[in-house]
Image: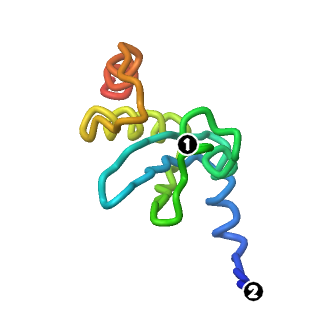
Amino acid sequence: MREWNITGTELTELLGPVVYVLSRNDVIIYVGMSRYGVSRALSSGHHAIGDEIRSTDSLRFIFCPTGDSAELLEAKLILQYRPSLNKMTDGLLRKIKRGAQ
């Protein structure tokens, strides 16, 4: 049995804006974001990674101060790493242009 003790500060971060990065064999295969914490990434019904998680995968969380900053970071990471489970869209470029203003 494992037990985690989470402080109030950590709980606030877990419930706030976050970018999540799924890696397999040290290769980034998906980047996502949520304005409402880690629950989206951990959902078994996630549209891209719900059925894709393997025991050797790692899921990294980057906590962001605002939803807009999370959205911008997500777009930049997708453009940088081109993860296989992400779809490239014109919306990514719009997010980056909007964030640069």
Pick the residue in front: 14 or 88.
Answer: 88
Name the mark on residue 74: none
The crowding category of the residue bearing disc 2, from other C-alpha atoms within 10 Å (few below 14, some 14 to 19, many at least 20), is: few
Percent position (x, y) of residue 88?
A: 35, 22
The residue under label 1 is which amino acid type?
Ile
Q: Is residue 71 left or right of residue 28?
A: right
Percent position (x, y) of residue 93?
A: 32, 19
Above/below status of 16 relative to 87: below
Pick the residue in front: 74 or 56.
Answer: 56
Q: Is residue 45 left or right of residue 48?
A: right
Percent position (x, y) of residue 59?
A: 49, 58
Pick the residue in front: 83 or 77.
Answer: 83
Among all residues in the image, which is located at the extreme top? 90
Above/below status of 5 relative to 60: below
| Quarter of image, res 40 | top right
Q: Is residue 44 left or right of residue 67?
A: right
Question: Residue at image x 46%, y 62%?
Answer: 58
Question: Residue at image x 46%, y 55%?
Answer: 62
The residue under label 2 is which amino acid type?
Met
Percent position (x, y) of residue 52?
A: 54, 46
Residue behind mark 1: 49
Q: Secondary structure at mark 1?
A: loop
Residue behind mark 2: 1
Q: Who comes first in sequence, dot 1 or dot 2?
A: 2
Q: Secondary structure at mark 2?
A: loop
